[in-house]
Amino acid sequence: MTDQPTSVTIPTDDGDMPVHLWLPPSGTGPGLVVLQEIFGVSRYVRSRSADLAALGYVVIAPEIYWRLDDAGFDESGEDFLERAMGLVARLDRPRAVADAVAALGALRGRAEVTGGAGVLGFCFGGGLAFEVAARADPDVLVAYYGSALPQLLDLAPAVRAPSLHHFGTEDAYIPMATVERIREAVAGPGVELRLHEGAGHAFDNPHPMFHHARASAEAWAQTTDFLARRMPV
């Protein structure tokens, strides 16, 4: 296994979508589609994808912004958050969902995938992963502070996959009253929801604006435990 991904493509009706692929040390295993934050397939998303591959998963991270012109940006720039908000506002969400569903289908079809195939998303990608779960029945769903979840709760009955949701108790975008509404909507025997005390939105992202070290470590341990139980290597 290498931390550096292989570049592949997935065909869509509008052309080939760029995708990053990481293989585990064994070369085969269950699959995971990692869905980006609003910052794209950033260094952070690539790092987490490599972490998952090291655990034994075949991982792909599709470039969901691939249809947008001028979608790249400097994560160290002062306007990086404003620029990312602008990108996601320009995104055609139904097409983005279709692209993510296509990514899951393509992953399932890869020879290296010898077990199940699931979705894991951060922030924007957490909501996207929830929509994929409602439409394409992955084997697992992991959503870190899915920002669109409050608007997607009518899809909850269609999500049958074992699911893990992470939220920070100090998330300004998803306040606790909203988290409780999400908890009620998604509740079921296969659903786990973890609260991380004192953490804000995007707490797993290492950028100083967002990072909460304890919550990040705690959530990652819970994620790896969940995957080991629900979609073992």
Image (cartoon, helix red, strand yellow):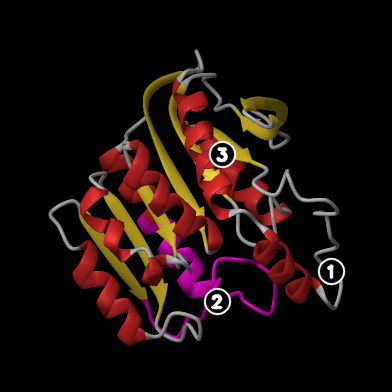
Q: Hey, what amino acid is under mark 3?
A: Asp
Residue beneath the point at 35% across and 45% down: 133
Please identify the residue farthest to the top as the structure is shown: 111
Residue 58, position in %: x, y? 51, 29
- The kind of secondary structure element at disc 1 is loop
Mark nearest the camera among 3 and 2 is 3
Residue 94, position in %: x, y? 52, 49
- Tell me the crowding category of disc 2: few under 14, some 14 to 19, or many 20 or more residues within 10 angstroms, Cα based: many
Note whether 102 is above or below 100 in the view shown: above
Q: Reading the chain from its start, which is encountered first: label 3 or label 2?
A: 3
Q: Does the magenta segment cover residue 203?
A: yes
Q: Reading the chain from its start, which is encountered first: label 1 or label 2?
A: 1
Q: Does the magenta segment cover residue 200?
A: yes
On the image, numbered disc 1 is attached to which residue? Answer: 76
On the image, numbered disc 2 is attached to which residue? Answer: 212
On the image, numbered disc 3 is attached to which residue? Answer: 99
